[in-house]
Amino acid sequence: MAIEKVGVVGCGLMGSGIAQIAAQAGCTVHVREVSEERLNKGLQSIEKSLSKFVEKGTMSASDRDATRSRLHGTTKLEDLKDCDLVVEAIIEQLPEKKELYASLDKICPKHTIFASNTSSLSITEMAFLTARPDRFIGLHFFNPVPLMKLVEVIRTIATDPKVYEEAVAFAAKVGKVPVQTSDRTGFIVNRLLVPYLLDAVRVLEGGVASIEDIDNSMKLGCGYPMGPLTLLDFVGLDTTYYIANIMFDEFKEQRFAPPPLLKRMVLAGWNGRKAGRGFYDYSDASKPRAIQLG
Ligand code: 3HC
């Protein structure tokens, strides 16, 4: 069965990107947010991204219009009732997800596949909150979704192999490169990325180098598009702190333990770009300046 109708729950940073690329790929998409205000904010970010593609000539105006026509915003979960696939991209809190999956289970027909975009919670645990653990997978996209080419497709011990194949085919259909992995906290990317980001904070905290020099080292010495501290600001210090704690809890390995400086910056609310301040100050968004640490 080819996936034609897609539901996306959550129209934040990740959900809006997922809804956008699915609509771009020709799927009919219903994206749901809890309030009109949040929905409009998400739809505006999709509009902005589509405009950028048209401006750059990577998308024609008629493709943009066709994408728009396939994309439907809603605040009603019931509007996702006919979907072949529902991708959940809501807050990373199990109680909220539990409530959502209980409702989706009632609303969606038996054939609907459920996918979570979680970066750190257990796919297995969520699968068994539903009456269809065999039709539950992880689809982990990367920020910014319209640009990043990777999707991790995550299977559990209960996933039906045919469902997994359909999910891999869907990831390719939406223009991404799927990588296949099993349900272990952090999957592939965060398993490797999170210790690297935490180490960058340890290097800073240990007085080895300045914020700019750490970032320039990895950008210019290793060809990374962003230095680790810039990337931490981009992903969100709170998000990384949260993921690191879950990974530490799972593996009990020191390399996943968030360093004290990261914790203190999160306590201060210096959560990165979205907060206007992280390792850099974004008061002038076009010229971020490294902060002075006391
Ligand atoms: N839609 C369309 N176009 C976009 C866009 C979007 N959402 N976001 C940025 N662009 C465009 C910009 O407008 C810009 O266009 P231009 O060339 O005409 O100016 C172009 O993309 C490049 O952007 P920038 O000039 O701002 O900056 P970069 O050249 O550095 O590229 C980047 C931006 C693609 C984000 C690049 O820096 C990059 O790849 N960074 C690393 C991102 C990364 O590692 N993401 C993964 C995070 S981990 C994660 O998501 C997992 C989670 O579980 C934690």
Image (tube, rainbow, N blue to C red):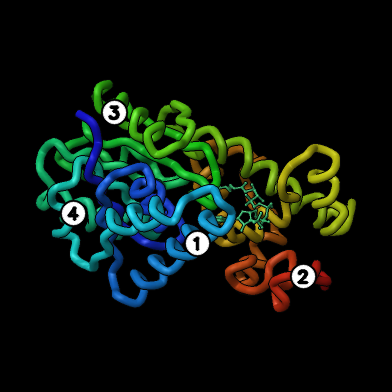
> Residue drawn 30% across and 53% down?
8
User: Looking at the rendering, in which quadrant would you find the C terminus?
Assistant: bottom right
Question: Which residue is tagged 4?
Answer: 80
Tell me which label, 4 or 1, sits earlier in the chain: 1
Q: CA distance from mark 2 to mark 3?
A: 44 Å
Q: Position of 177 compared to 195: left or right?
A: left
How many residues crowd around disc 1 within 10 Å: few (fewer than 14), some, or many (20 or more)? Answer: some
Rendered location of residue 20, percent (x, y): 39, 53
At label 4, which amino acid type do we have?
A: Leu
Q: Specify whether residue 158 is in view.
A: yes
Q: Which mark is residue 166?
A: 3
At label 1, which amino acid type do we have?
A: Ser
- Asked if the residue under mark 1 is in contact with the one under mark 4, i.e. CB atoms within 8 Å, the reply is no
Tell me which label, 4 or 3, sits earlier in the chain: 4
Q: CA distance from mark 4 to mark 3?
A: 19 Å
At label 3, which amino acid type do we have?
A: Glu
> Residue drawn 84% across and 53% down?
206
Tell me which label, 2 or 3, sits earlier in the chain: 3
Q: CA distance from mark 1 to mark 3?
A: 31 Å
Where disc 3 sits, the SS reads helix
State which mark lies toward you, 1 or 3.
Answer: 1
> Residue drawn 66% across and 42% down?
195
- Asked if the residue under mark 2 is in contact with the one under mark 4, i.e. CB atoms within 8 Å, the reply is no
Tell me which label, 2 or 1, sits earlier in the chain: 1
Q: Specify whether residue 245 is in view.
A: no
Q: Which mark is residue 287?
A: 2
Rendered location of residue 259, percent (x, y): 69, 54
Tell me which label, 1 or 3, sits earlier in the chain: 1
